[in-house]
Image: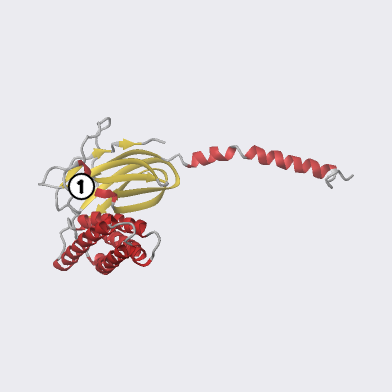
Amino acid sequence: MIGPNGLGGRGALRAVALMIAAAALLPAWPTAHAEEQSARVRSLYLSGSADGTPPPQGTEPSAEPVLFDAGTRAVFAHFSYEEAADQSIGVLVKGRGGVTCFSHTAKYNGNGSVSIEISGATAYAVLTAGLNGDARDAKQSAKQAAERSVGVQEFLRAAEAAVLRLQWTVDLLGNVVLPPEPTKRVDEIVTRLEQARSILSRAIELPADDVTGKQGRAAQVDTMLGDVVLASATLSEEAPSMTDLALPRSGHAAADAFVVQLEIDGDIAASAEFWVWGPARIYLPQVSKRVAIR
C-alpha cells in the first residue's frame, strides 16, 4: 500500500524511526564535545633548569614575577596536566607590548608533566621573524596611504600602529647581547622606525584636505620601511646560526615582565611571569598566578 507521500507502511515507519533517532542524538553532541575539552592544568611554575623542583604543595603564588639573572640563556616552564584527550597544549611567551617571544605547541594525552625550554636563541629567532613580517605589513599600509586618494588617514593610522609594534619588538632585540653586525642592523632599524613614526605623526596632523601632503609623507615612510624590511629579513635569515644567546633583558617594572601563557586548545588555562634583570640570585620557582581548572 502506498501512503500519501509515496511511501509504503514499512517505509514510512522506518523514516519516522530514523528521524527520532537523529533527534535523540542531537542533544548528546554538546555533552560529548564538552568531554573532549576536559584537560586540566594541575600546575605551572618557572625555573632555571630542566629538572627544576616544584614548589611545596599549598604554597601561595608570589605577587611578583620570578627574577632571573641578566645573561640567562634559558628559562624552563614546567607544567602538569591531566585528562587530556589528544589536545593541543601550548606555551606562549609575550614581552612588553604583547610582542610574542616564544611559542611551542604539542598534542597530549592522559596525565603527565612537561618541561619546556624557553631559550634566548629561540626567542631571538621568533622576534626577528615577527619583526620582518610586521615590517612588511607596515610598509604595505604606508604604500596604500601614499597611492590611494580615499582612506589616506586610516592607512596612515594603521601604519603608525604597525610602526609602534615594530618599536616594541626592536626594543626587545636591542636588549639581546649580539655580535657587532646584527647589533648594527638593529640600531639602523631603531633609527628608521623613529624617523618613520615622527613623519607619520606629522602626516596625520595635516589638514584633512591636504591629501597630497599626507601622501608625500607616506611615500617617505614607505621607503624607510623598505630599509627595515631588508634589514629584518637579514636578521631573520641569520638567526639559525645564533645558537648561544641570552634571553632579552626585561627591566624590572611590572609592565616589563615576560608573561608565560599556558593554553589548552587556544584558551588560556594558566600563566606565570618572569624578569631577566640585575645581579645573580637564587632561582625560586613560582606557581602560576592564575591556574584555571576546567
Q: Residue at x 22, y 34 (%)?
A: 63
Q: Secondary structure at mark 1?
A: loop
Q: Is residue 184 left or right of residue 88?
A: left
Quadrant hosting residue 127 = bottom left
| 174 or 48: nearer the viewer | 174
Across and down, in percent, residue 263 comes to 37, 45
| 164 or 195: nearer the viewer | 195
Across and down, in percent, residue 244 comes to 19, 61
Q: Residue at x 36, y 49 (%)?
A: 90
| 10 or 258: nearer the viewer | 258
Q: Residue at x 32, y 63 (%)?
A: 142
Quarter of the image with the N terminus in it: top right
By what rule are the colours in the image chosen? secondary structure
The three-letter amino acid code for the residue at tag 1 is Gly
Q: Is residue 24 left or right of residue 251?
A: right
Quadrant hosting residue 84 = top left
> Label 1, on which residue?
48
Across and down, in percent, residue 222 comes to 29, 67
Q: Residue at x 14, y 53 (%)?
A: 71
- The outermost residue toward the left is 279
Label 1 crowding class (10 Å Cα cut-off): few <14, some 14-19, many 20+? many
Quarter of the image with the C terminus in it: top left
Q: Is residue 7 left or right of residue 244?
A: right
| 40 or 206: nearer the viewer | 206
Question: From this viewpoint, is residue 281 visible?
Answer: yes
Across and down, in percent, residue 214 comes to 30, 62
Question: From this viewpoint, is residue 95 visible?
Answer: no
